[in-house]
Image: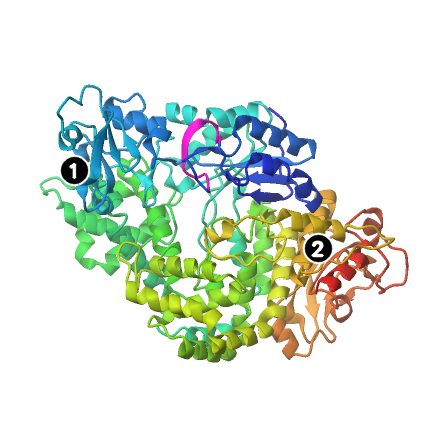
């Protein structure tokens, strides 16, 4: 195994059959030139045929053939290492894909042999609950009439299912054969309450595996271990550890397998929650950082008018999320609650007391999981979160007080099977009830409804932001920070535009009322959410917005649902989307709003990106977001990226001094400017780590002091504009100064040289961009592309340099 490496930054690539490992290998030089330190890959093990995400692994023994296979993976890793890049790979330990049984040898064996399968131990199945059979929820209203028998197998459409040896005879009917199998086809609607295998959330085609068993861990991680033995991979991102039986134990096993390699966990931390310090990991995938980064660019003055504008939206976030979680526990995750209740049933019979009725235990458990304020309690450390949930549940439902008292001892006992399963279940309920339901039922400022975030927290102060950075540097210096992922509800630049609405207040309220009058929809909260999506993602295509509207409305579940779509409502909803393209009056309103928010959204986007890349932690750049990217929820955020265009613009920004780069028509100011900021900041962190050894908040004074966030990382100084509409209202920067130690510095984005004064005048510094990245002059002079190679010593002047050529390019793109 190679020596342990820790990334300075990462670049996330979604590997698919259309953008396979060979294509990713061709990207290595671009990622290096961009300035990223590691290449970060989505899951690459063999997934379901045609999978676009890779989280439905069907065979752990090799790399996905549609994505290029083992050899292409090796070539990519070697190319990355030859270019000086590390390799980080996303792995999925909690579940496997079972949509196509023939593609998954473990699942096929389980169906064929039942409890007698040599891999039966791999799956989390309650055989007793199914009378010894595995329930497979795939039937529609035709029931077994939709199943055929061919060549000794059962078929549902084109999907084959095995039959147990000796169970098929001449003259048998489908019903005869089906009755003899170790599995039972059931109607898909029965999955909510009668399923007897654990899933990933409520996805029937993702079956959980028992990776806590040594044999399962070894079988599902042998290929992963070989990557480290062969020196191909440097680190791992662990998907959904909250679903595991024993996350800490799994992570210890993983550390042993990889030799303690760099490891991140996809862990959602609620406000105030800390990652367990005992875990042998380097941090999270960065949603906690995202929430703080977003909110420091949100105007707190917008909270009151936007709350009023949201109309029928529930005002009590805690009550809303309690109710949505309870709906999930009673609905699509009812099977998990039922199974937990079966575990608890015998333990409720005390001395002289009868066993509690099953339905009352189910009711109490549903109330408890609806009362959690975190995704999972890690017993015994997280016992206080569980106790709080128990107390809340008893307070909300006093009629269940006796049941809660009886089951509480088992639930707080870390060694009790019910306590462990409750921990596996609570995260599912939280994710489905909050991220996938409540987030679509709140609309006052939709940029706040992001994974790992709490929309009831409207904004954070600059002081709170600085404290969060100090805490990260002190506790988890190598944790990832992010702004966009494959799971975010809206990309960073879409959120940056939506955040401007907090500065408009009454203006946005009036605009929303006008839009509602022109294209009414009888779900005010959803209408507000859709208009913000249209504004934030503009100019998104009609097709993309229709797809988003359908997903958002059905996830919200107020006016239509996935299982019972309301066609009349959805027709009116789609008419709203069409109005954004076809109704001249609506288009005029949207165009006028664009003129109002374009520059401010651009400012927010550049500010967020520079702050993310230069703040403590390991910044990740999600594929394509080095340009302006206005995406919505998946699959919209997994669209192909035009790397030829990005390469072209980066080459121009890095062009020679003499003749200057050619102009690039058709490329907007946004994309080129963001690529400039991203590349210069990434390169500086990679090439000059000594400038990022600490975190010091910098004080601002003057008439616009509230409109800047600035910090010194140990030589590299970041300055970013916040609340740009408000900055206009106070007349610009005026006398505003940022105070730093007296040192001659150069802005890497413009080449502007600053004299060695303590006060940095923002009116002079931020004339070209709303952000600045300052380094000591001697660093700039010694650095190649991406820094100012100074040729004039006049303090305060814009020097002739690569950076000045960059500005020329940007002006040509505007």
Classify mark 2: helix, strand or loop.
Answer: helix
Specify whether residue 317 is in view. Answer: yes
Residue 713 horizontal side relative to residue 448, left or right:
right
Which of the two residues, 121 or 642, is positioned nearer the viewer here?
642
Residue 433 versus residue 73 in the image, above or below: below
Q: Nearer the viewer, mark 2 or mark 1?
A: 2
The mark that comes first in sequence, 2 or 1, is 1
Region of the chain picked out in magenta, as a range: 53-65
Q: Let me know if residue 60 is in the magenta part.
A: yes
Q: Image quadrant for the C terminus?
A: bottom right
State which quadrant residue 804 falls in.
Answer: bottom right
State which quadrant residue 310 falls in.
Answer: bottom left
**Residue that mark 2 sits on:** 676
Give the percent coordinates (x, y) of residue 169.
15, 21
Give the percent coordinates (x, y) of residue 201.
34, 45
Residue 518 versus residue 9 in the image, above or below: below
Disc 2: CA contacts within 10 A as few (<14), some (14-19) or many (>=20) = many
Give the percent coordinates (x, y) of residue 124.
30, 33
Residue placed farthest to the top in the image? 166
**Residue that mark 1 sits on:** 346
Q: Residue at x 36, y 29 (%)?
A: 104
Residue 716 horizontal side relative to residue 636, left or right:
right
Image mark count:
2
Give the percent coordinates (x, y) of residue 810.
73, 61
Which of the two residues, 6 or 578, is positioned nearer the viewer here?
578
Q: Let me know if residue 691 is in the magenta part.
A: no
Specify whether residue 694 is in view. Answer: no
Q: Residue at x 63, y 52 (%)?
A: 626
């Amino acid at each position: 195994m190679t020596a342990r490496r820790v990334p300075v930054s990462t670049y996330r690539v979604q590997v698919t059959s259309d953008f396979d490992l060979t294509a990713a290998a061709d990207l290595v030089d671009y990622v290096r030139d961009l300035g990223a330190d590691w290449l970060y890959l989505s899951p690459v093990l063999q997934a379901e045929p045609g999978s676009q995400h890779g989280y439905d692994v069907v065979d752990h023994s090799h790399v996905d053939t549609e994505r290029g296979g083992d050899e292409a993976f090796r070539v990519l890793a070697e190319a990355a290492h030859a270019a000086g890049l590390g390799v980080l790979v996303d792995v999925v330990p909690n579940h496997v894909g079972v949509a196509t049984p023939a593609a998954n040898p473990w699942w096929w064996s389980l169906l064929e042999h039942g409890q007698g399968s040599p891999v039966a131990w791999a799956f989390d199945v309650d055989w007793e609950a199914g009378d010894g059979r595995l329930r497979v929820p795939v039937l529609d209203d035709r029931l077994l009439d939709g199943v055929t028998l061919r060549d000794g197998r059962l078929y549902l459409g084109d999907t084959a299912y095995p039959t147990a040896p000796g169970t098929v005879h001449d003259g048998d009917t489908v019903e005869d054969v089906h009755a003899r199998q170790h599995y039972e086809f059931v109607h898909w609607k029965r999955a909510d309450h009668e399923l007897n295998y654990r899933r990933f959330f409520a996805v029937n085609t993702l079956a959980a595996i028992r990776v806590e068993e040594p044999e399962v861990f070894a079988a599902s991680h042998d290929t992963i271990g070989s990557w480290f033995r062969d020196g191909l991979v440097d680190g791992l991102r662990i998907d959904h550890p909250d679903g595991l039986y024993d996350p800490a134990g799994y992570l210890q096993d993983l550390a042993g397998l990889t030799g303690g390699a760099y490891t991140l966990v996809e862990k959602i931390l609620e406000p105030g929650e800390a990652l367990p310090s005992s875990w042998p990991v380097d941090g999270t995938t960065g949603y906690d950082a995202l929430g703080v980064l977003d909110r420091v660019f949100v105007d707190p003055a917008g909270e009151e008018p936007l709350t009023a504008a949201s109309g029928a939206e529930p005002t009590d976030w805690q009550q809303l999320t309690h109710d949505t979680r309870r709906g999930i526990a009673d609905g699509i995750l009812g099977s998990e609650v039922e199974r937990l209740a079966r575990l608890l049933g015998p333990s409720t019979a005390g001395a002289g007391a009868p066993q509690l009725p099953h339905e009352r235990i189910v009711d109490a458990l549903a109330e408890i999981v609806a009362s959690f304020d975190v995704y999972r309690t890690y017993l015994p450390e997280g016992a206080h979160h569980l106790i709080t949930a128990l107390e809340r549940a008893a307070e909300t439902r006093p009629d269940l007080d006796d049941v809660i008292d009886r089951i509480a001892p088992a639930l707080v006992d870390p060694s009790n099977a019910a306590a462990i399963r409750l921990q596996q279940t609570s995260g599912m309920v939280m994710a489905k009830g909050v991220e996938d339901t409540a987030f679509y039922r709140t609309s006052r400022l939709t940029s706040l409804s992001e994974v790992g975030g709490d929309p009831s927290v409207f904004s954070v102060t600059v002081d709170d932001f600085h404290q969060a950075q100090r805490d990260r540097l002190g506790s988890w210096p190598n944790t990832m920070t992010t702004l966009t992922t494959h799971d975010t509800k809206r990309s960073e630049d879409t959120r940056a535009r939506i955040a401007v609405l907090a500065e408009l207040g009454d203006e946005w309220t009036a605009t929303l009322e006008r839009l509602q009058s022109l294209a009414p929809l009888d779900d005010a909260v959803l209408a507000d959410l859709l208009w913000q999506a249209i504004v934030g993602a503009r100019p998104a295509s009609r097709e993309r917005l229709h797809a988003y509207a359908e997903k958002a409305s059905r996830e919200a579940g107020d006016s239509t649902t996935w299982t019972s779509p309301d066609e009349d409502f959805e027709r009116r909803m789609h008419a709203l989307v069409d109005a954004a393209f076809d109704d001249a009056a609506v288009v005029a309103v949207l165009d006028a709003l664009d003129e109002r928010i374009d520059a401010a959204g651009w400012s927010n986007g550049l500010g967020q990106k520079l702050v993310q890349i230069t703040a403590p932690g390991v910044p990740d750049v999600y594929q394509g977001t080095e340009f302006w990217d206005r995406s919505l929820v998946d699959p919209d955020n997994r669209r192909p990226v035009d790397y030829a265009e990005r390469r072209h613009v980066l080459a121009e920004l890095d062009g020679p001094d003499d003749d200057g780069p050619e102009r690039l028509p058709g490329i907007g100011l946004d994309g080129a400017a963001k690529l400039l900021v991203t590349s210069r900041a990434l390169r500086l962190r990679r090439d000059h780590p000594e400038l990022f050894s600490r975190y010091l908040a910098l004080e601002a004074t003057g008439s616009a002091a509230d409109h800047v966030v600035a910090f010194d990382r140990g030589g590299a100084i970041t300055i970013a504009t916040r609340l740009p509409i408000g900055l206009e209202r106070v007349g610009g920067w005026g006398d505003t100064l940022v105070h730093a130690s007296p040192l001659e510095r150069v802005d890497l984005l413009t080449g502007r040289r600053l004299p060695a004064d303590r006060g940095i005048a923002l009116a002079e510094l931020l004339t070209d961009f709303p952000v600045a990245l300052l380094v000591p002059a001697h660093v700039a002079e010694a650095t190649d592309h991406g820094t100012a190679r100074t040729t004039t010593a006049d303090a305060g002047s814009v020097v002739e340099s690569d950076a000045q050529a960059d500005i020329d390019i940007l002006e040509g793109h505007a």
